[in-house]
Image (cartoon, helix red, strand yellow):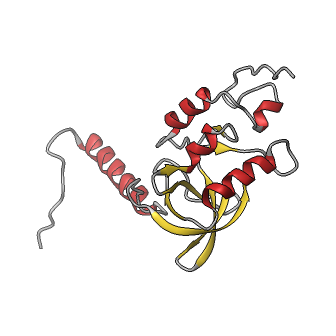
Amino acid sequence: MMQHRFTFPFGNKRTQKNGLTWLAALLVCAACDSEPPVSAAAPEMGMVIAIRDGDTIVVELDGSPSPVRYIGINTAEHGRPCYREATDANARLVRGQNVRLTRDPDGPNRDAYGRLMRYVWRDDLFINAEMVRTGLATAHAMTSSFPERLYRSQLVAIDHASPDRCTIYRYSSIWPDGRSLPFPSA
């Protein structure tokens, strides 16, 4: 019985062996990918059933409540200045509304707390950007390993143009990107 042996049409046996090793490694890595590739054009639809704070909501998706963290923005945490203002604004924008959720193809599906990481729209209003535009949120990348590239430049541009700041960064001396922030005069 004759055995057929695959050989590359170029190089010597050593380069052919290295090429096959790289090809095998590539195939193994592709097979190990835990999640399918994400498209920014694959939105999820749901109704907002609760507001957790200025950058987190609970959306009913497929009959189940799912906490959703807005990608690329941050608002004041509970007990901090502006927490109530950001939470109330978020509630006015989305409570009881149908929203469209989009995952960033460069970012994680969930954060460390199990919340879905999404860009959120109500009709044609981009909620993540609206929170930044009002000065109740600031633009930032969630982690250095997941830069959330899809709308990052838009959020940063709105953040830099927003004159009113009622965010956690107003009460500190450093912006997330390292720029100094003068404290507001009273």
Please state, as top left, top right, bottom left or bottom right, where the C terminus lies in the image.
Answer: top right
**For the point 28% across and 40% down, which residue is it?**
15
Give 177 or 3, whichever is nearer the viewer.
177
Is residue 142 in view?
A: no
Image: 85 above or below 158 = below
**For the point 71% across and 60% down, which residue is it?**
113
The furthest residue to the bottom: 63
Total marks drawn?
0
Residue 88 image offset from top left, x and y in percent: 74, 54
The furthest residue to the left: 2
Give 18 or 159, whichever is nearer the viewer.
159
Residue 69 image offset from top left, x and y in percent: 64, 56
Residue 40 image offset from top left, x and y in percent: 41, 53
**For the point 61% across and 52% down, which residue is it?**
70
Quarter of the rendering containing residue 56: bottom right
Residue 121 image offset from top left, x and y in percent: 51, 55
